[in-house]
Image (cartoon, rainbow, N blue to C red):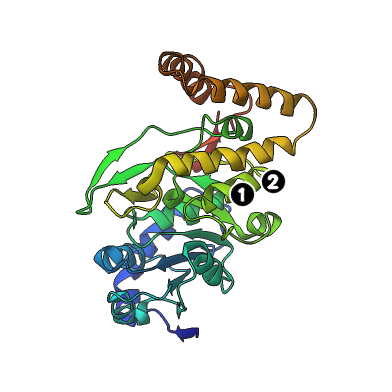
Amino acid sequence: MVSITEAQPVAAAVAATRAKVADFEIELGERESPRTQWPKITLVTAVYNGAKYLEATIRSVVEQGYPNLEYIVVDDGSTDGSGEIIRKYERAVSCWIRQENQGLYAALNAGFARASGEIMGWLNSSDLLQVNGLFTVGSVFAWLREVEWITGRPTKISATGMTIDVLPVPRWSRRRFLAGANKHIQQESTFWRRSLWEKAGGYLDTDYRAEGDFALWVRFFRHARLHSVNALIGGYRLHEGALSSSNMERYNRNCDEIAGREVESLRGSERAALRAFRWISDAVKPIPKVRGLWQRAAMRNLYWMRGRDWPEMIEYGERGWELRR
């Protein structure tokens, strides 16, 4: 049984953020942005027995004060009090859904099926948005109409909620991603346009426990370039119950299989080059010394080596967000 509660944002919360939004409007106007209004962002949080961190996750979203937010929370059959936390904040979210336990990606699909935003993303029930992360997302997409898909600086958050690591700005390309070099796109910092979601099929694959985001990125790469933003958007919380870290060997193996199938779907020299590179990577895995040398000499260089396949990076300049080589 699916129950849906619709609600308007809490009036007090809206009033408290008016001055903040006005400041952003002034800043945008001073930099002569082509923006006409804040784009509508749909953010989905799916939770299953995540009461320990869920309230902090919800607050990191609703306390942003972003003026055009559709926040959808899906309770995937929790039995630990997650539902009570959602009800506590039900007037601050746009929609919340309760359904029988069907898995993370089925729950996210249920949320996205009700999405109406121009910009889309999701935040897992233990992770956090960084301060003003949604304003960063909204302003980037408003300024740069040609950009379809972005990700911010990867950040790590401790179990107690502290930002404990801010990593270098990564660069992405489809070829390197499929080769296995640039594998880990931080989902918490990643947003995209609805048009890209629709071109990629408009769904997350429910056959996976933790690799559905990787499979989605593979499909996105068929249609768009991933632009890194030199800013903080979201953070991944390190904790014992983290989904993808619970069995990293299986996660990497499944991601490699997904990428391998995509490589086989390619044609000509691109497929031949990627197949050869991946074959060598697989061949050296059982040999520790050779594997280490290959990682240092090939994989790390492939990750950081500048190339024409890198899209422009998004950085904040004197006139606002800019695409820079």
Quadrant location of the C terminus in the rendered image: top right
Residue that badge 2 annotates: 223
Q: Which mark is residue 148?
A: 1
Residue contact at pointers 1 and 2, CB within 8 angstroms? yes
> Relative to residue 125, is residue 1 depicted above or below?
below
User: Dot 2 lies on which element?
Assistant: loop
Which amino acid type is shown beneath numbered disc 1? Answer: Glu
> In percent of the image, x 69 and y 44: which residue is there?
222
Which of the two marks, 1 or 2, is nearer to us in this view? 2
Answer left or right for 78 relative to 117: left
Mark 1 neighbour density, 10 Å: few (under 14) some (14–19) many (20 or more): many
User: Dot 1 lies on which element?
Assistant: loop
Answer left or right for 33 relative to 14: right
For marks 1 and 2, the one nearer the N-term is 1
Q: Position of residue 183 (x, y in %)?
A: 50, 36
Residue lying farthest to the right in this orientation: 268
